[in-house]
Amino acid sequence: MTLTGRVRFLQNVGLEEIGNQQRGTRPLILFVEKIEGGAKKKPEPFFVSPVVMFKREKEWIDYGYPPQHQYTFVNCEPTEAQLSDAAGWMERYAAQFEGELVTNFDEQSPLLADAPLSYQRLMTKTYDKPIIQNLLGKVVVKSLKHLEVREMIMTQNNVKVGGNAIINIDSELKNVTQTINASTGLKSMQKSKLDDLVQQLKAELKPIEASHSEEVQAITASVQKAVNAASKPEAERKKPFIDLSADGLLRTAKLVADVAPAAVHAAGQLATYIQGLV
């Protein structure tokens, strides 16, 4: 069997904790891009552990004083049939305690999508707000200015504010595109590929621009920094700085891993391409 890919240090791809466990060495990881040859055999089964939250409706006298919200999970193979069975088991488990499921466990599959805080409802903003208030407690608004800006951003595409308020991705990443186009150190094909990857990341960040403005602002700043380093003339590009900025982009993108995993993937593709320019 022949494996073709790109070798990287673990510390340079966001795996510092694992890499730093090996004293006196710098472990490598191979990102496989192509597999040739080798005997085909049936892969061994592996298991996943879907987890959901459920809410009990009554006190459990026999159990003392547990919190109202509990978690349950089940081990199964990641097949459609077994995941469906797992969802049914979770519903029955919650029902044993006169409770109901609050979350589901898959943003792609519609299993348990009717749960009050399912991935599907969170993405379409049809989630149950009273449940969130119950989980988080009373929310105190210290400034109405930010609330006003949140309303404006929905109707005016050119609104741009700083601090903790919402930013405009179109405006912020337009500067990145201009940096790419103005670069004298990149070939036309490299410019086109780099801009395509930036636009893909922009598309994945757009849905969470309003709800996670601080994270989006940090990610766009990391994109600008990484692109600035990559757009320098080839002779002026320094690999340590390129790797540092690409690694910073990926680590910053992980701030939204829970709500926008596709954005993390897009940031990873952008970071990998930037590292490949040196």
Image (cartoon, rainbow, N blue to C red):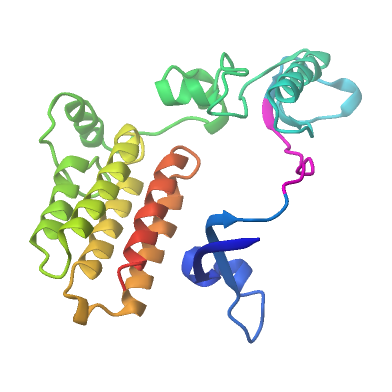
Residue depicted at x 28% and y 64%: 226
Q: Nearer the viewer, residue 36 or 129?
A: 36
Pick whichever, 80 or 131, lies toward us. Answer: 80
Q: Quadrant of residue 227?
A: bottom left
For the stretch drawn in magenta, the main secondary structure is loop
Q: Where's residue 124, x and y in %?
A: 41, 21
Q: Position of residue 229 (x, y in %)?
A: 24, 70
- At 57% from the left edge and 23% from the top edge, which residue is drawn? 109
Q: Tell whether 193 sits left or right of 265.
A: left
Name of the residue lying farthest toward the bottom: 24
Quadrant of the drawing holding the C terminus:
bottom left
The magenta segment: 40-53
* Residue 46 is covered by the magenta coloring: yes
At 10% from the left and 68% from the top, the residue drawn is 184
The residue nearer to you, when weighing 99 against 250, is 250
Image quarter in which the N terminus is found: bottom right
Is 262 left, or right, of 242 in this rendering? right
Residue 254 vertical position relative to residue 155 in the rendered view, above or below: below
Q: Is residue 239 left or right of residue 40?
A: left
Q: Quadrant of residue 91?
A: top right
- Count how many numbered circles sit on residues in the image: 0
- The answer to if 20 sits in the magenta stretch is no
Q: Position of residue 133 (x, y in %)?
A: 50, 25
Q: Is residue 168 visible?
A: no
Residue at 57% across, 13% down: 114
Considering only vertical position in the picture, is 102 above or below 266?
A: above
Dividing the picture into quarters, in which one does residue 179 lie? bottom left
Q: Is residue 106 visible?
A: yes
- Point out residue 251 in the picture as x, y percentages from the top left corner: 44, 59
